[in-house]
Amino acid sequence: MLRKVLITAALATSFVAPAFAATTYYVEQSASTHKCSVTTHKPNGKTFTMVGTDTYKTKADATTAMKADAACKM
């Protein structure tokens, strides 16, 4: 009985843990102010638009891409 519980808990943890650990960063641009920012949620396309098509694994990578993009230099 205890063995089944441990196996079930291990399987549940193995599927859930990567979802919490994976953070994706996006570079977004405000439709009204045209200022760029880095965010962890995907821009909705109405009030914020995604700059480029890439997603980034770290905030530093997204910030570097934002500074290099021509649309964010306005």
Image (spheres, rainbow, N blue to C red):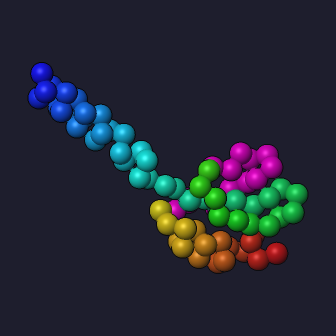
**Residue at the spot x=43%, y=53% of the render?**
22
**Residue at the spot x=19%, y=27% of the render?**
5
From the viewer's perspective, is 19 left or right of 66? left
Q: Is residue 51 visible?
A: no
Where is residue 64 drawn, in percent x and y?
59, 76
Pick the residue in front: 26 or 2.
Answer: 2
Residue 12 occupies quadrant: top left
Residue 71 occupies quadrant: bottom right
Is residue 1 shown above or below 10? Answer: above
View extreme (front): residue:
2
Is residue 46 shown above or below 60? Answer: above
From the viewer's perspective, is 71 left or right of 7? right
Pick the residue in front: 57 or 16.
Answer: 16
From the viewer's perspective, is 50 left or right of 73? left
**Residue at the spot x=80%, y=49% of the render?**
47
What's the magenta region? 42-56
- Quarter that holds the C terminus: bottom right
Where is residue 38 drawn, in percent x and y?
65, 64
Where is residue 8 drawn, in percent x and y?
22, 29
Q: Is residue 45 visible?
A: yes
View extreme (top): residue:
1
Pick the residue in front: 1 or 20.
Answer: 1
Q: Main secondary structure of the magenta part?
A: loop
Residue 62 occupies quadrant: bottom right
View extreme (right): residue:
32
Is residue 41 shown above or below 14? Answer: below
Residue 39 painted magenta: no
**Residue at the spot x=11%, y=29% of the render?**
3
Is residue 15 shown above or below 49? Answer: above
- Quarter that holds the N terminus: top left
